[in-house]
Amino acid sequence: MKLRPEQQLGPFLILGATMPDMIERDITNIETLEFLADEVLELVEARSRERATVLAFHGDLGSGKTTFIKVLAKKLGVVETVTSPTFMLMKLYGLPIQRDKYGEERFDVLRKFVHADVYRIEEIDEMRVLGFEKILAEKNSIICIEWAEKVSEMLPEDTIDITFTLKEGQRSVTITHGD
């Protein structure tokens, strides 16, 4: 039996239950990606803001990594067009300022969205030269890294791994994370 996206979500967003360490979803359309982005943002929200939250993306070319990152960026309020930074390696986007009910600026929310595509790097030291370790240490940031296996030794233990697969025309995603 094929489930609709809202049925696939189960109780996680609706009841606020703890997310399992592994989530698997079939991707049938852009709406499914939007529901998935909500799930990932719930995981991100539960993380400490003392350093960047890292989303490590894995999967073959054309499997949906960049499309999902675009959906995620839009949900976070990025208004610029998000494109894969394959030749620049990284692109940084500011996120909208959020205010509390008294109009005061909130400092406990995400402030920066970083999109990295490390497909073209040959040595991990290329990332060190770019100041990647400093970016990983920045508070209130979210970093989406395509082809993250190339820089895995630099990533924190609590990285959220998101793997896209494309098999016989069907896309699916597996999310694994530790707390």
Image (tube, rainbow, N blue to C red):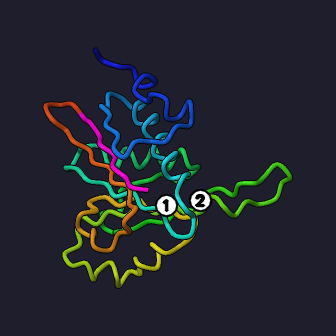
Image disc number at residue 110: 2
| Quarter the C terminus occupies | bottom left
At 39% from the left and 57% from the top, the residue drawn is 55
At 26% from the left and 60% from the top, the residue drawn is 147
Relative side of 4 to 106, left or right: left
Q: Position of residue 75 (x, y in %)?
A: 54, 44
**Whole-number angstrom distance, CA of label 1 to CA of label 2:** 7 Å
Q: Residues within 10 Å of mark 1 (few under 14, many from 20)?
A: many
Relative side of 64 to 100, left or right: left
Q: Secondary structure at mark 1?
A: strand
Answer whether labels 1 and 2 touch (C-beta < 8 Å).
yes
Indicate the amino acid at tag 1. Answer: Ile
User: Which residue lies under the disc numbered 1?
Assistant: 142
Magenta region:
171-179
Say which quarter of the image contains residue 168. top left
At 28% from the left and 66% from the top, the residue drawn is 118
Relative side of 155 to 16, left or right: left
Q: Nearer the viewer, residue 10 or 140?
A: 10
Farthest residue to the left: give it. Answer: 168
Q: Nearer the viewer, residue 65 or 81?
A: 65
Which mark sits nearer the N-terminus, 1 or 2?
A: 2
Relative side of 96 to 177, left or right: right
In the image, residue 116 above or below residue 31: below
Farthest residue to the right: give it. Answer: 102
In the image, residue 55 above or below residue 5: below
Indicate the amino acid at tag 2. Answer: Leu
Q: Nearer the viewer, residue 160 or 33?
A: 160
